[in-house]
Amino acid sequence: MPPRGPYEKGKARRAEILSAAVEVIAQHGYSKATVKELAEAVGISQNGLLHYFGSKDALFAEILRHQDQVATAQVTPETRDFTDELVDLILSVVTAETQSPGMAQLTLRMTGEATEQSHLAHEFFKDRYEAIRRVVETAVTQKKEKGQIGTDVDASAIAALVFASWDGLRIQWMYDNSIDVRAHMEYLLRGLGLTAGPEDSPLIP
C-alpha cells in the first residue's frame, strides 16, 4: 500500500496539539486552557483546532487517553511483575499530580462530567477505573502469594479503596493545598498492609 501521507500528517498534527495542550494546562491551569489559548499555542485557528478533535471536551478526553496509554505501557500486569513496586508506583503518580494541578483539575472535572452515559468520555473513564483497579488488585494478589501480606485480605476491596481514597484526597487538596496527599496515601497503604520497596517483610514464615 502507498504511504498515507494526509493521514500521517493529520496524526502528527494531533500529537503536536496534544503536547501543546498538556503544556498549557500544566503552566496555566485547566481554567485558562480555552480553545483560543490552545489554538494560539499551536499556531492555528480555533476552527482548525476543533477540526482535529471536534470539541474541547473531545480534545481533553484525548489528552487524558494519551497520558494513560503512556502509563499503561509501563504497568500492565501481563508484561511486568511490579508487585514490589506497587506502593512506590502509586506514590510517584500522586506526587506527579500534585506538581501539575492543572492536569489534576482536568481529570477531576471530566471524571465528574463523564458519569453520564451519554458523555463522549464515559466509556473511557469506565475502562480507566477498571484498568487501575486491576493493576492494584493483581499486585495485591501477588503479594498474598509471596507471603508479603495477609492471606485473608480482599485484593478487590483494597483496589477499590485505594482508588476511592486517591480521588477523595485530590478533591480535598484542590480546596486546601496544605493537605499532604502523598503522606495520607502512604498512611492508608501502610494501614492496608502495603509498604514501599522490595524489602517487604513476609507475614508468613
Image (cartoon, helix red, strand yellow):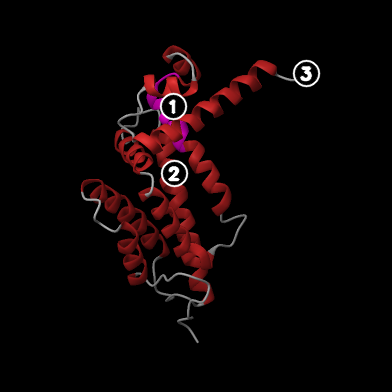
Residue 142, horizontal then vertical, whole percent: 52, 68
Residue 133, horizontal then vertical, whole percent: 43, 53
Q: What residue would you read off at disc 1? A: 59
Whether residue 27 appears in magenta in the rendering, the answer is: no
Separation of marks 3 and 1 at Cα, in angstroms? 29 Å
Q: In the figure, residue 111 lies in which quadrant?
A: top left
- Magenta-drawn segment: 54-64
Q: In the figure, residue 110 lies in which quadrant?
A: top left
From the viewer's perspective, is residue 196 above or below residue 96? below
- Mark earlier in primary sequence (1, 2): 1
Q: Nearer the viewer, residue 25 or 47?
A: 25
In the picture, the disc for residue 128 is 2
- Mark earlier in primary sequence (2, 3): 3
Whether residue 63 appears in magenta in the rendering, the answer is: yes
Q: What residue would you read off at disc 3? A: 2
Residue 38, horizontal then vertical, whole percent: 42, 24
Q: In the figure, residue 163 lies in which quadrant?
A: bottom left
